[in-house]
Image (cartoon, rainbow, N blue to C red):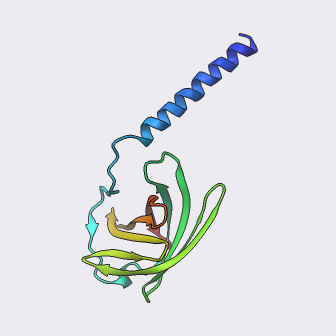
């Protein structure tokens, strides 16, 4: 096999991955991210106060947006810091408990969160939307012990 045949084969493989990524990105994924783990109603903010770590994905994307540390304080504020391969993101906002769920945000974003039980471990699922661009994200967080 000569170099030209190897290059053509590599392009076909790359095209296959691009097609797979496009199909996955355009799949009929629900607009609302849902957990298969049982929902645990949040009674008060103290239930979720503390440090959480997880992965956030941009909606309808195959690749993760990056790892995020989320800190929730008992005064109703949150702070997050996230790291991707090319960027660091930092943000703050306010949250409150409404009907067993977290809701809140800032001038830049809206957030909503639910608590779930994964075999005795608390999982926090968060959905966020950028108010300016409309970009939507979802994340799954575990409490830092």
Residue 24: horizontal and vertical position, in percent? Answer: 43, 39
Residue at the image position 27 percent from the left and 66 percent from the top: 39
Q: Residue at x 65, y 18 (%)?
A: 8
Q: Residue 32: horizontal and vertical position, in percent?
A: 32, 57
What is the residue that sits farthest to the right in this orientation?
Answer: 3
How many labels sit on residues? 0
Q: Is residue 18 above or below residue 46?
A: above
Identify the image quadrant of residue 140: bottom left
In the image, taking residue 141 as reference, residue 17 lies left or right, namely right
In the current view of this chain or complex, which residue is farthest to the bottom?
Answer: 75
Residue drawn 43% across the image and 53% down it: 59
114 with respect to 142 (left or right) = left
For the point 48% across and 65% down, which residue is it?
Answer: 132
Name the residue furthest top.
Answer: 1
Against 86, residue 128 (above or below) is below
**Residue 51, image x and y in percent?**
50, 76
Q: Which is more toward the observer, 123 or 4?
A: 4
| Rendered position, 2 above or below 11 | above
Most extreme residue toward the left is: 99
For the N terminus, the image quarter is: top right
Residue 10, image x, y percentages:
64, 23
């Amino acid at each position: 096999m000569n170099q030209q045949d190897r290059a053509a084969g590599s392009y076909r493989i790359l095209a296959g991955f691009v097609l797979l990524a496009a199909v996955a990105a355009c799949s009929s994924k629900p607009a609302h991210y849902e957990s298969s783990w049982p929902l645990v109603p949040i009674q008060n903010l103290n239930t979720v106060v503390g440090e959480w770590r997880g992965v956030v994905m941009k909606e309808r994307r195959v690749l993760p947006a990056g790892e995020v540390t989320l800190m929730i304080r008992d005064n109703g504020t949150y702070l997050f810091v996230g790291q991707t391969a090319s960027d660091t993101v930092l943000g703050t906002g306010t949250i409150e408990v409404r009907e067993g769920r977290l809701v809140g945000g800032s001038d830049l974003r809206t957030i909503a969160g639910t608590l779930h039980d994964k075999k005795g471990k608390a999982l926090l699922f968060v959905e966020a939307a950028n108010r300016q661009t409309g970009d939507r994200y979802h994340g799954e967080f575990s409490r830092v012990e």
